[in-house]
Amino acid sequence: MGAFAPPSDAALVERCRVAGLKVTPQRVAIYRALVATDAHPTPEDVFHAVRDAVPGLSLGTVYKTLDALEAAGLVAQVALPNQAKRYDGNRAPHHHLICTVCHRIVDFTDPAFDALAPSSPIGGFVAERVEVRVRGRCGACDEGSPEENHG
Amino acid sequence: MGAFAPPSDAALVERCRVAGLKVTPQRVAIYRALVATDAHPTPEDVFHAVRDAVPGLSLGTVYKTLDALEAAGLVAQVALPNQAKRYDGNRAPHHHLICTVCHRIVDFTDPAFDALAPSSPIGGFVAERVEVRVRGRCGACDEGSPEENHG
DNA sequence: CTATCTGCAAAAACTTTGCTTACCC
DNA sequence: GGGTAAGCAAAGTTTTTGCAGATAG
């Protein structure tokens, strides 16, 4: 089955509609770019990726659009120390491997992690989502050069 | 045993020495302020907390000092979306509850979480540390006002 | 038609940097 | 003394905001 098929533009458009967001070429292009990559790009990254397909696109629009998509729950932000905002278009529950050398963020899923919840309710805290962040060195940074490989 | 006793200034000074950091009044005051709180403050927060004890302290020094302490591994950063840097002086392994309403960060530990590791090595990734982030609503924000309670 | 959205540019927020003086070791 | 660190202020980055014209529904 198409469990790994990327969502069609129609699907993205539909999600915008459901969220009450107007469907514009800029918005769809930005949304699609984010869903199509697993690189957790910054707004700048998205801007550059979409610029060609949408002439005249402005960086400000990218910021506003990512904000809107995030507020609508269609994409998420992955905040890392000492870095610009990074976005994640992957809606499925998943976790992150974060390379401390090249700052790559790799999605992963793990059956054992999916049911995680604190064993006791802490101070009335009501959990909604759990994200596990594993920090370490990615394959490239571990074997290859101990230096920066790339982001 | 004094498992929950805050570290003495002498202990903090010693850690600085071991890390090769010169010991200055500013540095110790900033370090102590961070270790003494569980509020995960921003550099601004730290600045205000320490300002009275260290007249003439500058915000720039707070930034530089927090950088130095982080580089030395004595404190950590907790990056959250749409917020200024936040620091964590808690060196013990622990995880975070993050309130989506008031943005409070609460430390917690959980035996079940401490041994976490991906069940299969992903792409040669070598894990070093694991942080679990539980997002939801803190006690105050869940019962009380559904609005902002406070940061 | 009307509310939203875009592009542009200015402004704000946050953080880093450069340099001189002061201080720890 | 020599090398770090502090203070100050300027500069740099990143992100937000305001507004006029364009556009989706």
Image: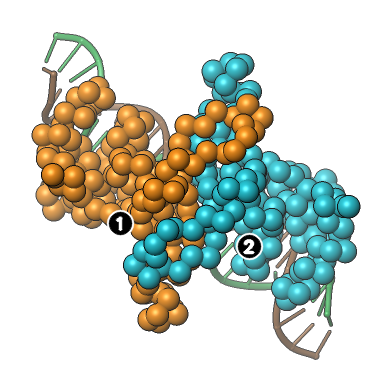
Chain colours: A cyan, B orange, C brown, D green
Q: Tell me, yes or no, whether dots 1 and 2 are on the same chain.
A: no
Give coordinates of residue A91: x percent, y percent. 69, 57
Marker disc for residue B39: 1
Residue B99 in view in this figure: yes
Q: Residue at 16% of width from left, 41% of height from top?
A: B7
Most foreground residue, B83 or D22? B83
Residue at screen point 64% across, 39% down = A106
Q: Which mark is residue B86?
A: none
| Residue B5, position as x, y percentages in the image | 15, 47
Which quadrant holds the C terminus of chain A?
top right
A124 is higher (above) or lower (below) than B3: below
Tell me which chain the residue with mark 1 is part of. Answer: B
Check disc 2 and report the residue beneath it: A70
Q: Amino acid at mark 2?
A: Glu
**Residue B93 coordinates in the image, percent (x, y):** 36, 42
Disc 2 chain ID: A
Left or right: where A34 falls relative to D17: right
**Residue B44 in picture, x, y percent from top left:** 31, 53
- Give the side of residue B39 with respect to residue C17, left or right: left
The structure residue drawn at horizontal position 45% and vertical position 40%, both measured from the top left corner, is B115
Badge 1 amino acid = Ala
Is C9 or B129 nearer to us in this picture?
B129
